[in-house]
Amino acid sequence: MLERPPFKTCPQCGREQGFGILWVSSESYDRRCKFCRAKATYYLPEVDKKVLYLDQFAISEIFKVKERKRRADAPHAEFWTEANGLLDRAMMRQQIICPASNIHRDETMVYRDGKALDLAHEMMGGDTSFEDTTTIEHRQIYRHLEAYLKGEEPPSFDFDVDEILHGHRNAWLPDLHITVETDWSAFVEHTRQARDKAAEDFAPLYDRWVRDKPAFEDVLANELGAMARGYVDAYFHFMAMVQAGEASGDVQTYINGALSPVVTLIHEINRKFAERGVPPESAFRETVKFLNWPKNQSLPHHWISAHLFAAIASRLARGQKRHPSRGMMNDIKAIALYGPYVDAMFLDNECASLLEEKAVARGVKLKAKIFCLKRSADFLAYLRGLTDSAPQEVIDAARELYGTA
């Protein structure tokens, strides 16, 4: 029997508790009587959902509440319990979604309850997820490349959130969720090592900032001017992997190098120059010239991340003893690539406070409202405001579909 609650009296045969939910689609739902098989389709009101990016630690805390794995006396227990309830209500009222991203996937892999956590977060986004961060980053670069090739000024970005989402943001949440379980176990160790290696690679830089005590403005200027160097150095690193893998017969090393995002990016830019008549042997030189284009400093993801790194340097120069956490690189990536597009972000206190640094706040204007544990009351008020703003017809339809709203 495919009919599901909540059941109603069938309008055709009159049997009570017979007319159940058969299917919920993005814009409509079907009811069918389990007795007489009468069927009807009902159309749902249009909605305009906000998009909330949740930091991985927030997803983990909400997951613990849902699974009843969180101790009642654990820190911030009352907040996370209330946040979970309000989020559920806002999602049922079709006011917000919390899509998953590749950043979440990588961080979930190394979590002991990774599969259950991944599914719980997946359901918070319905059938919607974020584009891969690399895709968003490269798309911005290609738009600048197009302007560069035409001799034009860099384009303006409207930061429409639908541009960075898979799926339909304003689809009504299905009452059934079908998922395909992917076994990421083969990638867990590599992902953990890559995360730890990134933290190790940045440690000498952090130490230098502690020792040299550079000014915010100096670090910012250096970071903004280092775009080409960063991409080119990474390109040569991965091409060396390709050569080493080819020489030794190590297929995995070869593939990891050849399919790395930066190699794809550089080769695609080379191809664009070749299409315009640049000899193949000169294409890479032209690519480097483009990457060094001063106006690339305004690339949204590059501009934001440079400001955040400068803020970290400024804090270390002022005497902050602790190096940033291992997850800081992912946090900066999320802020730089999702922050201009989404409506709100719940971050850890460290990242949220970086955005509040005066020099960062002056230079970085995000669309997203920023929340963290230190602003927990504001976050709860934000969620209450969303639930309270739902039109009555949406609330009624949500009760019809899910039995609660």
Image (cartoon, grey):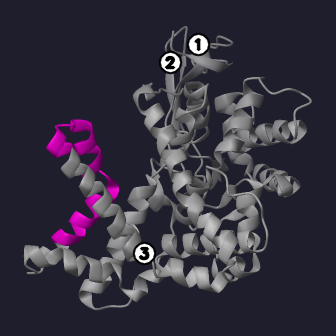
Task: Residue 79 in the image: state x and y as whole percent.
Answer: 86, 42
Range shown magenta: 245-271
Image depth: mark 3 or mark 1 in front: 3
Q: Position of residue 353 (x, y in %)?
A: 76, 65
Q: Is residue 234 above or below residue 37?
A: below
- Residue carrying label 2: 38
Amino acid type indicated by mark 2: Ala
Q: Earlier in the sequence, mark 3 or mark 2?
A: 2
**Residue that appears at 57% across and 66% down:** 205
Q: Which one is closest to the eye, mark 3 or mark 2?
A: 3
Task: Tell me the distance, in whole angstroms, between the alpha carbons under discs 3 and 1.
Answer: 70 Å
- For mark 1, what is the residue? 13
Query: Do the residues bearing badges 2 and 1 touch, measured as CB atoms within 8 Å?
Result: yes
Give the amino acid type for the residue marked by disc 1 in the picture: Cys
Label 3, secondary structure: give it.
helix
210, 382: nearer the viewer:
210
Quarter holding the C terminus is top right
Element type at marker 1? loop
Of 140 and 51, nearer the camera is 140
